[in-house]
Image (cartoon, rainbow, N blue to C red):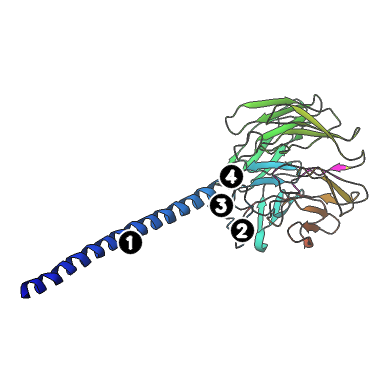
């Protein structure tokens, strides 16, 4: 009996040990599966975040530094200066160029102020992100002494403080710098009213691009109307109130009737869908915008066309162009913020200055 009794506990202990091992193994397998699923989910979230280039920024304090530049469609007024693959949209800075001294005055995000002397009184300011670092560069177009001599662009690079002097265009041309090749850099470009020619010096490979669109009375309005990340050659013809665009996505020319003969073109991405909207500023102060997302009109009254200057831009960093004007007589900026539907008033500049708003990020 003693042997039988002494052997039973040993069998039970062995049986319990096997059950314990099986439970332990099952727990390890379950933990491994959960861990693998967690890692996979995190990887998918990271992958999704990296590919969500046009996602609306989340709440929090964005980083607009040069070392961590935001990625967005960079507009200055109606021109698409550059395209950067997306993250956070940097706000348009208030800025003026003082003709008398060739000095740039920038009022940046958070009230930061920057002053830069660059240019002479006879120059034309042509800001743009020519070096692709996500910061707008100070630049001027210097007309030659006669109609047959090539003019010079003077570009101060924000990356390292060096400067370049490409020779491009004649003094009878109109400057039309924009990102035509979609490489994230502003291309030196002009529109020639005499023959309706567009002449672009592509930053991606240094070659020239020539397009034919427009006539001597048209207004050049290059921007990204088809949403492919490249600026399209485009003009607005007041005589028949028609917009003409060569779409880079298809290579075809499209037209859109919008506005009246006394209007001023003020295109921009007002609805935030990644496409430039046809828009005009009427003599009575009304901004009439054809939203590309819905093909419907949005109208807003701001400014006096006879005395104010249109300075539309994304001042509140919500990826939508804000309706805005600058009043030379007082130096006041009137900005209708699309994010809050409230008006921002700011005094910056004086009579005789040229408004040059853009995301300088200084």
Say few, some or many: other residues with alpha carbon within 10 Å of mark 1 (under 14 / 14 to 19 / 20 or more).
few
**Residue 66, numbered label:** 3
Q: Secondary structure at mark 3?
A: loop
Mark 4 or mark 1: whose residue is earlier in sequence: 1
- Pointers 2 and 3 in contact (CB under 8 A)? no
Answer with left or right where residue 273 lies relative to residue 135: right
Q: Nearer the viewer, mark 2 or mark 3?
A: 2
**CA–CA distance in space, label 2 to label 3:** 20 Å
**CA–CA distance in space, label 2 to label 4:** 17 Å
Mark 2 or mark 3: whose residue is earlier in sequence: 2
Which residue in the rendered view is the most extreme toward the front?
1
Which residue in the rendered view is the most extreme toward the bottom?
2
Q: Position of residue 119 (x, y in %)?
A: 69, 44
**CA–CA distance in space, label 3 to label 1:** 49 Å
Name the residue beneath numbered marker 4. Answer: 85
Name the residue beneath numbered marker 1. Answer: 27
Q: Secondary structure at mark 2?
A: loop
Q: Secondary structure at mark 1?
A: helix
**CA–CA distance in space, label 4 to label 3:** 15 Å
Q: Nearer the viewer, mark 4 or mark 3?
A: 4
Quadrant in which the N terminus is drawn = bottom left
**Residue 262, numbered label:** none
Mark 3 or mark 1: whose residue is earlier in sequence: 1
């Amino acid at each position: 009996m003693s042997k039988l009794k002494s052997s039973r506990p040993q069998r039970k202990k062995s049986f319990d040990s096997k059950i314990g091992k099986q439970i332990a193994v099952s727990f390890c397998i379950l933990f491994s599966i959960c861990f693998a699923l967690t890692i996979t989910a995190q990887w998918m979230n990271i992958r999704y975040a990296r590919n969500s280039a046009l996602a609306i920024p989340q709440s929090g304090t964005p980083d607009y530094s040069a070392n961590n530049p935001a990625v967005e469609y960079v507009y200055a007024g109606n021109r698409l200066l550059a395209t950067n693959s997306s993250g956070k949209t940097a706000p348009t800075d208030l800025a003026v160029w003082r003709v008398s001294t060739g000095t740039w005055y920038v009022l940046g995000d958070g009230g930061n102020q920057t002053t830069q002397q660059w240019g002479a009184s006879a120059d034309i300011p042509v800001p743009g992100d020519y070096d692709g670092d996500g910061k707008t560069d100070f630049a001027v177009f210097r007309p030659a002494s006669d109609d047959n001599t090539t003019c010079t662009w003077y570009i101060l690079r924000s990356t390292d403080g060096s400067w370049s002097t490409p020779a491009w265009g004649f003094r009878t041309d109109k400057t039309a710098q924009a990102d035509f090749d979609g490489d994230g850099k502003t291309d030196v470009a002009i529109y020639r009213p005499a023959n309706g020619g567009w002449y672009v010096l592509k930053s991606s490979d240094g070659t020239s691009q020539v397009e034919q669109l427009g006539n001597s009375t048209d207004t050049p309005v290059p921007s990204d109307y088809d949403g492919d990340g490249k600026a399209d050659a485009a003009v607005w013809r007041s005589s028949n109130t028609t917009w003409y665009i060569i779409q880079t996505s298809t290579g075809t020319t499209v037209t859109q009737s919008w506005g009246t003969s006394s209007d001023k073109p003020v295109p921009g991405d007002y609805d935030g869908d990644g496409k430039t909207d046809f828009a005009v500023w009427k003599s009575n102060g009304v901004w009439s915008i054809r939203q590309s997302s819905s093909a419907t009109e949005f109208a807003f009254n701001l400014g006096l066309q006879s005395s104010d200057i249109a300075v539309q831009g994304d001042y509140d960093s919500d990826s939508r162009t804000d309706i805005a004007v600058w009043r030379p007589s007082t130096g006041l900026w009137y900005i209708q913020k699309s994010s809050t539907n409230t008006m921002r008033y700011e005094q910056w500049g004086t009579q005789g200055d040229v408004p040059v708003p853009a995301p300088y990020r200084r």
